[in-house]
């Protein structure tokens, strides 16, 4: 007897069926999709970055994640001492090294800036 809402008439409810393994196909498909699109490539990049840091040695020319170009003059477990200009050495955390540049890049850039 509501003016705006009609009364619901109860009918015999059908038997409720529990979804079997077919009901899990779509959610599993979504999880597999996200794994191959997002998680796997990120894990691959992380592994490559870790290998790059392990093989980095004194004399390597690097670019930090902040964009600083320099030459490694000292290394320890956590930090790298990087020469960014003649007689100017800074310390950066090893995991902040973005990439190792080809030999000669640092030298070419220092000659260009003079």
Image (tube, grey):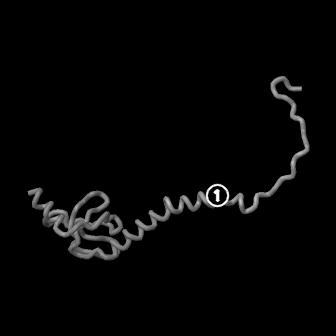
Q: Position of residue 58 (x, y in %)?
A: 23, 75
Q: Is residue 43 above or below residue 7?
A: below
Q: Position of residue 11 (x, y in %)?
A: 90, 41
Left or right, 80 with reference to 107: right
Residue drawn at x 11%, y 57% is 112
Foreground residue among 60 and 15? 15
Residue drawn at x 45%, y 63% is 41
Q: Position of residue 56 (x, y in %)?
A: 29, 74
Q: Is residue 5 above or below residue 21?
A: above
> Which residue lies most toward the front here?
22
> Which residue lies most toward the top here?
3
Foreground residue among 91 and 20? 20
Residue drawn at x 33%, y 72% is 53
Q: Position of residue 87 (x, y in %)?
A: 14, 66
Quarter of the image where one finds residue 48:
bottom left
Q: How many marks?
A: 1
Left or right, 75 with reference to 9: left
Q: Is residue 79 above or below residue 110?
A: below
Q: Is residue 10 above or below residue 69?
A: above
Q: If the image is split into quadrants, where does the C terminus sit?
A: bottom left
Q: SS for tag 1?
A: helix
Left or right, 10 with reference to 77: right
* Residue underneath mark 1: 27
Left or right, 1 with reference to 91: right
Foreground residue among 86 and 23? 23
């Amino acid at each position: 007897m509501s003016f705006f809402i009609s009364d619901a008439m109860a009918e015999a409810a059908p038997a409720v069926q529990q979804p079997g393994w077919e009901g899990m196909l779509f959610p599993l498909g979504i999880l597999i999709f996200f794994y191959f699109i997002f998680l796997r490539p990120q894990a691959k990049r992380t592994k490559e970055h870790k290998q790059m840091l392990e093989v980095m040695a004194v004399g390597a020319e690097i670019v930090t994640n902040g964009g600083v170009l320099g030459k490694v003059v000292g290394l320890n477990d956590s930090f790298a001492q990087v020469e960014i200009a003649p007689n100017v050495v800074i310390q950066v955390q090893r995991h902040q090294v973005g990439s190792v540049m080809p030999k000669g890049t640092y030298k070419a850039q220092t000659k260009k800036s003079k």
